[in-house]
Amino acid sequence: MKNVSFKNRNSTQRERLVAGMIAAVNRQGYAGASVSAVIAHAGVSRPTFYDHFADRADCFLAAHRDVAQELLQEVELAVTAAAPACAVQTGVRALVEFAAAQPERARLLIGETLAGGPPTLDARDRTIVQLGLLIERAELQAPVDAATPDISIRALLGAVHWLLAPPLRRREHDLSRLARDLADWIESYLRPTSEHRWRTIAPGPALAPTAHKSELSLHPPAPLPPGRSRLSADEITRNHRERILYATAQLAAHKGYTATTIADIAARAALDRRVFYARFRDKQEAFLAVHELAGQQMLAVIAGAFFSAPTWPERVWEGLRAAGQFQADHPVFAHMGLVESHAVGAPAVQRIDDSRAAFTIFLQEGLQQTARPPSRTAQEAIAAAIFEIGYYHARNGQSQLAPRFVCHPIYVCLAPFLGPRAASEFIDGKLSASGDDGPATAY
């Protein structure tokens, strides 16, 4: 009986600590969910915390595993009970309903995982993969001629995660409108399963380099020679600032925001820490400056390429090709913009949300291409799915291959306006005209 009692007490304490982590994250975000905050919410001692978890990251990951398991069970029940041809729509609806019913747990699972660095990002990505496998397994039971969404489940589920995070942060729990709009968006990709081409994110043919490239230098400026410089004070300041920005971007890709220190940045930039503090207040300000630079450069490149083409589909083609080239040319800046935003803090998170909304500007002309224009939510979902594909490359160290993946985001963008078949035919025509071999069936 003593062993049973001890085991039950341990289980109860662990559950209280997990609940304490969820409460702390919802009140203070990942950055504020310290061990002190967790034990205060859990009502247990610090030694008890360390009896169960190595540190706060270990506790967070345990909470993530518990919540992810709950979500996976809910989605599995839903897709098993539904018609196989509707597995994708059913799975997404189950995900949104889980978020509406369990907003605090969903916020930890969907939003705050992005702030914790590589281990929590791995957990986030693993959950998306597991959700996708559940949905695809159910969908395999559908007839081959059934109409199912011809879109990467990974990109789609990633998009839903990006769209759910902001309302969960704002504590908006009525997600019924979001669920309806997402269902309509998913159905814009319906096509007979036997004709699917875009379910797997895989490299396609190598495209000719785009002429639309960023003015951002590929390398940081060289360190100034020792001794008194002949440069002006403004030129010296610019040299120091740019070296710090490049060093910060490189470290973001290598170590992540949380693990990087000001000493790391100063050493990588070959500058004294006093020089760092003369240019930036703290680490967050330096990271925010890099994040802003990356976002501005990416949007500028897309806009320049987009408005160089005569028709809207060709504008999308040119704009997203330029985006892929930017990611390949500037992988550390792309990593900063696509992966590290939530770790840097609220200003960077807001900037990411704003940039996805800004991307929908490039979709407005497409509204004239269809009698059933996608909703505002659908347009933001398109942007989020494209963002997820870029995130996928950056997280997997494949940014240099981004130009070879560009047909997939182009299809994601065009299909809700032109229809899946016409979007595929447009891409095939562009590949043929540019001398690439055949249709993009590798996708």
Image: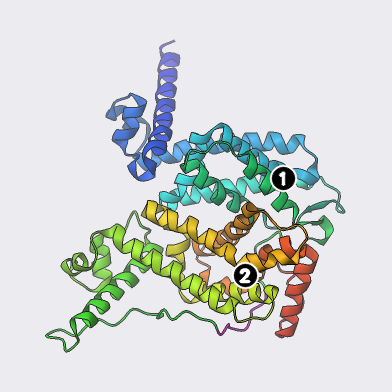
**Mark 1, residue position:** 89
Mark 1 vs 2, N-terminal side: 1
Q: What secondary structure is the stretch in magenta mostly built from?
A: loop
Residue 128 lies, in percent from the top left, at 59, 48
Q: Residue at 33%, 78% (x, y): give it.
A: 220
Element on which disc 2 rests: helix
Q: Residue at 37%, 80% (x, y): give it.
A: 219
Residue at the farthest bottom position: 230
Q: How many labels does the image show?
A: 2
Q: How crowded is mark 2: few (under 14 residues within 10 Å), some or many (20 or more)?
A: many
> In front here: 107 or 43?
107
Residue at the farthest top position: 1
Please check the rendered image and state whether residue 210 is part of the magenta-colored stretch, yes or no.
yes
Element on which disc 1 rests: helix
Residue 325 visible in the current orientation: no
Can you tell which quarter of the image residue 150 is in? bottom right
Q: Which amino acid does label 2 sit on?
A: Phe
Residue 187 visible in the current orientation: yes
Quick one: quadrant of the C terminus? bottom right
Residue 400 lies, in percent from the top left, at 52, 73
Marks 1 and 2, how far apart in space?
Answer: 25 Å
**Mark 2, residue position:** 405
- Give the residues in magenta: 205-211
Is 197 displayed left or right of 231 in the figure? right
> In front here: 325 or 348?
348
Kindly report which numbered mark, 1 or 2, lies closer to the viewer in this rendering.
1
Q: Is residue 390 above or below residue 60?
A: below
Question: According to the image, what is the colour scheme of the structure?
Answer: rainbow
